[in-house]
Image (cartoon, rainbow, N blue to C red):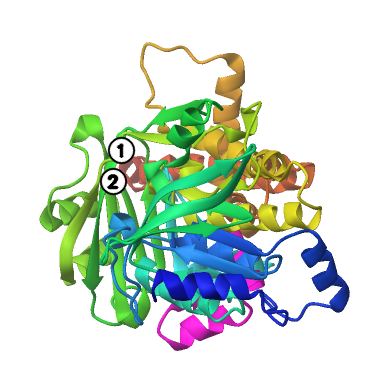
Amino acid sequence: MDATRAESNLGAGNSDQSGAGQRSAGQRSFLMKSGRKHAVVLGAGMAGLFAARVLSEFYDAVTVVERDMLLDHPSHRQGVPQDRHLHNFLGRGVQALAEFFPGLLDEMAAAGAIVVNDGDLGRIYARMGQWELKRSGMIADPTGLTLCLASRPFVEFYVRRRVAALPGVTFLDGHDVLEPIAADDAVTAVRIVDRRSEITTALNADLVADATGRSALIPAFLERLGYGRPAEERSPTAVGYSSQRLAIPSGSIDQQLVMSNRGPREPGVLLLACEHHTWMLAVGRSIENGGAPADFATMLTLSEDVLPRSIADALRNGQPIGEIATFRNPAAVWRRYDQMRRFPRGLLVVGDALCSLNPIYGQGMTMAALQASTLRDCLRSGDAALAHRFFTGAAQHINPVWTRNHANDRLPSPSRKRSIQQRLRRQIVKATLIAASNDITVAERLLRVGHLIDPPARLSDPALIPNVVVANVRHLLAGFQGPRRLLQRSPLARVAAHQ
């Protein structure tokens, strides 16, 4: 598709275009009076696709500009080097995916993705510190923890196909973004260049959404216009990780999701079933202990130390597909656009361009979906102070995740003394993990918090305290019984019993 075709589509303003479904005449009238004719999204990654999906409800035309050529099948893209790594929607992200694209989960499942929605804990192996999550039983609300397991190119392709089918949406691939164009304190267009013909084009826009990822196009643009750069919060990450796609003999592993996180001194492992009977293995290691594994053999060796024998043996029988991918991320970055005193109208920043979280936690795609939900809520309330309202709303989703990640990324220091509050919090976390290994109610709550369905405060729910207490008492009693049984079986005990 060339720029001329895109501009002709954008100028048409076809009155029967309806975004993501049928709009009433009243809605259409409101949108036209609001001047919402054309929105441009920069970047066709997951954040850009979610943004385009929402914008299609409110603008007559939406153009998605992408540097890569977009193929008609799932494929790796040069502009998304991280797509060779393990990606996953958390439960809250799956909810948003199903809301924005009804029927998409069934569509992807039919094409080979693994959709886990029966609530069976036997499908999950999770170890946190010394404790394993309860490995059997059915959770009370399976829909809240539905998982869609597939590779990043697979998911992105099926989402992109849905977005491309929306009335009024156009994809302009093979184009680089040069810069937004501003006038009178507002962004009014964006200048792009065709990577093949090198022809430069200016796309007029009522709204430009930057979803170009970590490249951070907007801070320098704002500085040139006199707005200044946004403040940046940085959280250094002390872990490097590697990913490898595998073919594992069918039936070798009972679970679809395997996770082991024994603490910052031990390697972390995540293993997911993916489309077409393949698996994605990710192994992380602290920088001081060697960082990202350099080869598949090292990944296997590190995995064997922290996984159950049956799963480790299955990995040994797996066959690598393609090359290993390594990731060394120096820091997570949150650009605080919500704190800027001035910001031009007609411009938004979403996804990793707004906040790039530590990818080892697998939260990026879910956060992009939550930002899209925030954007929709803001647009429903009108255009006044849109950027400020959006960035403020997005910060409410980002802040608790950022805070928790930052705390987890800090390596414990033997010389640093913990406060009473920190020691108490540590004991509460320990008690909760012990309970989650035996009590299905606590296990479900822990999963819901980890998957961003519930806020962390829900772990302090008074109704949960009896479950935690009972489970910890049983754990304590079992600890007493263990040495007693060993003592009863000892030779000295047998001699004493016969005297």
Question: Is mark 2 in CB contact (under 8 Å) with mark 1?
Answer: yes
- In the visual, does 483 lie left or right of 81? right
Within 10 Å of disc 1 (Cα), the crowding (few <14, some 14-19, many 20+) is many
Within 10 Å of disc 2 (Cα), the crowding (few <14, some 14-19, many 20+) is many
Residue at the spot 39% in from the left edge and 60% down from the top edge: 87
> Residue 71: percent from the left, percent from the top?
33, 77
The alpha-carbon separation of the residues under discs 2 and 1 comes to 6 Å
Residue 387 colored in magenta in the image: no
- In the visual, does 390 lie left or right of 317? right
Outermost residue to the bottom: 110
Q: Amino acid at mark 2?
A: Gly
Which quarter of the rendered picture does the N terminus lie within? bottom left
**Residue under circle 2?**
284
The kind of secondary structure element at disc 2 is strand
Q: Earlier in the sequence, mark 2 or mark 1?
A: 1
> Residue 239: percent from the left, percent from the top?
30, 38
Please give the label number shown on residue 447.
none
Residue at the spot 38% in from the left edge and 68% down from the top edge: 173
Q: Amino acid at mark 1?
A: Val
The kind of secondary structure element at disc 1 is strand
> Depth check: 225 or 488 in front?
225
> Residue 229: percent from the left, percent from the top?
50, 27
Residue 110 colored in magenta in the image: yes
**Residue under circle 1?**
239
What kind of secondary structure does the magenta stretch mostly adopt?
helix
* Image quarter of residue 104: bottom right
Report the span colored magenta.
Answer: 92-116
